[in-house]
Image (cartoon, grey):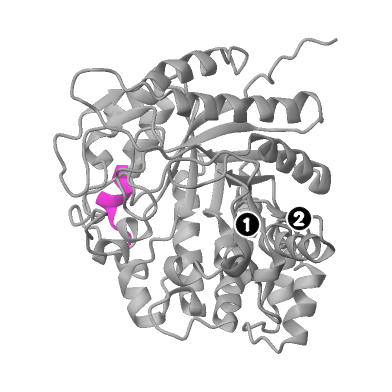
Amino acid sequence: MTARKMPKGFFWGNSVSSMQTEGAWNIDGKSLSVYDLRPATEKTADWHDAIDEYHRYEEDLDLLKAMNMNMYRIQISWSRVIKDGDGEINPAGLAYYDRLVDGMRQRGIEPMICLYHFDMPAKLAREENGFMSRKVVDDFVSYGEKMLDHFAGRVKYWIVFNEHNLYFTDEAFNIAGYDHGDQSIGDMYQIFHHTMLAHARLSKYAHGKYPDLKFGGMIAYTPVYPATSKPVDVYLARKSNEFLNENLNKLYTTGKYSTEVLAWIKNHGIQADFQAGDADILAGIHTDFLAFSYYRSTTLNADKVPAGEAPNRYLNWGFEHNRFLEESDFGWDIDPLGFRNIITHTYNAYGLPVFPIENGIGCLEKWDGEHEIADDRRIAYHRSHIQAMEDAIFEDGAEVLGYLGWGLIDIPSSHADMEKRYGAVYVNRGNPDLRDMKRVPKKSFYWFKKVFASNGEDLA
């Protein structure tokens, strides 16, 4: 049997968003995003401070380097670098990302840039209703082109939208700058279509002007299993996967919507602002790799789904926990075999390199101020998922570019909960108490350090 040897140059690293790390919400010329206006609640923080990486980025990069990471995926805050999203460049905001990118490169850490991670400039949300507007598409493309021009010589790997398929779900109304409307299925489809046009335009610009860049598409991949072997469960699970996952990967690789999605739009009279010339824009897509986040799988019970419901919304009704899987502290099914399955399926189906750029487990953890946090459950989670990924590589033949954890230095969750912790490094703050934000390595820090140093060969 041939020895399993991970590919040379494999990427091991961390992924974050700007609003979950930076803080510094109202300094150095930053204009407001929709997140800056969201208040704290009894169980969540506001977004003003995050983990203050804006001021502590050197310390955090040193921690990533100490874990032997060689990639860090960040997001540029649109409202930090472009005044109100449609104004002039803010030199101080751009200078922060210069320092961050240069700091990575000095440490041998490859940067990856994401251009949008839910934080619409507040002015564009209020005045234009976010990605409901074609003006906002133009504004976003203008911003993206400026960032490509500025960083192309230093940043090779790019994605446009974090978890792009979420804009084809009801989450679109929370992440697309949607300020007003009835949250109809037509509005959802229009938002998604507009974001797809923005992605296509930036893909064409990047490859036309900077052919050496690697430009990927990213989805939130939560595979949908049928609750039983009843044909209707199997059918609705397949249809849900087609709309939520396969449709977007087909767009990335062919520049065309799934025929099943197009048929549903036609048969139900959905007005999604398809205009003359849009098909040509989509046809210009060029994708170098297929990226995704993966945390869990899910299960669909067709008996709970109302007749005539849009496939995008099946899980709103029919979601069930998988009785065969363990759950995390936050009720998410833990499914490493599902991770292997989607890596292998995606590579088999589309023939492009696959790149899981978010993976992790949220845990409830407390630090007593003295002793190391023994986060054995996190170690077990990542060990099983890295092992599953390596099985996909060595046993199934998938081509995988790397493995990035999510928030491996603690950050507030996507719903602003600092107590849902993904990190190998504890950040000493809570909701809403900022404390001193001291960075404290957990037990998993040393495990990751060993795994990454061995290029994934030592998982013990």
Highlighted range, magenta: 88-96
Q: Residue at x 43, y 60 (%)?
A: 118
Nearer mark to the viewer, of 1 and 2: 2
- The extreme bottom residue here reads 269
Q: Which mark is residue 203?
A: 1
Q: Residue at x 52, y 46 (%)?
A: 332
Q: Quick one: 317 or 156, which is closer to the camera?
A: 317
- Find residue 97 and report its horizontal and vertical position in percent: 35, 43
Q: Amino acid at mark 2?
A: Thr
Residue 118 against residue 153 in the figure, above or below: below
Residue 94 included in the magenta stretch of the image:
yes
Disc 1, SS: helix
**Mark 2 Cα shell of 10 Å, populated few (<14), some (14-19), many (≥20):** few
Q: Quick one: 435 or 113, which is closer to the camera?
A: 435
Q: Which mark is residue 228?
A: 2
Res. 154 visible in picture: no
Disc 2, SS: loop
Could you tell me which quadrant the C terminus lies in? top right
In this rendering, the count of numbered labels is 2
Residue 393 against residue 173 in the figure, above or below: above
Residue 113 against residue 35 in the figure, above or below: above
- Find residue 27 and report its horizontal and vertical position in percent: 17, 53
Quadrant position of residue 385:
top right
